[in-house]
Amino acid sequence: MDEFLEQLKKYAVDNNIPILQCDARTFIEQILLLKQPKTILEIGSAIGYSGIVMLNAAKKAHLTTIEKNAERVSLAIENFKKANLSERVNLIQGDAKDVLEELTNLKNGDAARVHGVSIGVSNESFSCADSGTLRAASPANYVISGSQKFDFIFLDGPKGQYANYFPFIKKLLADGGVLVADNVMLGTSGIKKLTNTQLIKKRQDFVDMIMNDDELITSIVPICDILSLSIKQT
Ligand SMILES: C[S@@+](CC[C@H](N)C(=O)[O-])C[C@H]1O[C@@H](n2cnc3c(N)ncnc32)[C@H](O)[C@@H]1O
């Protein structure tokens, strides 16, 4: 698996696709090994690199992951298949805000109907439904229901949107659940050069939200481009 992940990393670097950096990867693996979540939600699948890392660390987990870019969705599907992880993945193509909103607004017992395309991936086949029930065409026939909460959420989508996603993410996070967000502040790599003050402010808004939320216990973790770690108190 390490060799395959190295290949994916090389592909990402060669094609300018941002993926989890080494130290951030180790940090997330450690949290997952401790927490052993059953359900993981990821915002920003890219080509599936972090999804594969997370499913390797959390052996019993099922991953729901959201990606807007169609080309990356196709690559991620292929990569989950190659890693033999398709049965544990529900990949949703769509804008994260729309998908999060629809997942959050599901009523108990309802299966999800999401904006965008839901792709269940399996080794044999995968199905797409642009307006149908959100479910994976995997043997487990995984269905996201209205009562779905996630034990672990990895927020790694568009950085300027984190504050807008936060109300949905908080509702989707299970009691005792863990939220990790990547790139929450200006860190050690290219983001240092960020001069867009509006984007800097949006990041700060998100940090203020998680730091000041009474239900969350949050730390800012100075690794790579700065992660946050929040635990939702029961
Ligand atoms: C930093 S990359 C994710 C990297 C991935 N988590 C990994 O470490 O392998 C962020 C991803 O978010 C996707 N993205 C950007 N805006 C989005 C949106 N509005 N909705 C869903 N995905 C979006 C981008 O296409 C990109 O692939």
Image (cartoon, rainbow, N blue to C red):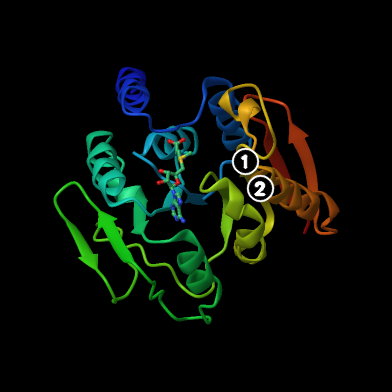
Q: Which residue is mark 1?
A: 35
Residue 69 location in percent, x, y?
34, 50
Q: Is residue 146 left or right of residue 52?
A: right
Quarter that holds the N terminus: top left
Which residue appears farthest toward the left when viewing the image?
124
Q: Residues within 10 Å of mark 2 (few under 14, many from 20)?
A: many
Pick whichever of labels 1 and 2 is earlier in the sequence: 1
Q: Is residue 233 left or right of residue 90?
A: right
* Nearer-the-camera pick, 36 or 162: 162
The amino acid beneath tag 1 is Lys
Residue displayed at 60% across by 30% down: 191
The amino acid beneath tag 2 is Val
Q: Which residue is mark 2?
A: 178
Ligand 1, by image quadrant, is top left
Quarter that holds the C terminus: bottom right
* Nearer-the-camera pick, 143 or 18: 18
Q: CA distance from mark 1 to mark 2?
A: 8 Å
Q: Is residue 178 left or right of residue 2?
A: right
Residue 51 location in percent, x, y?
42, 40
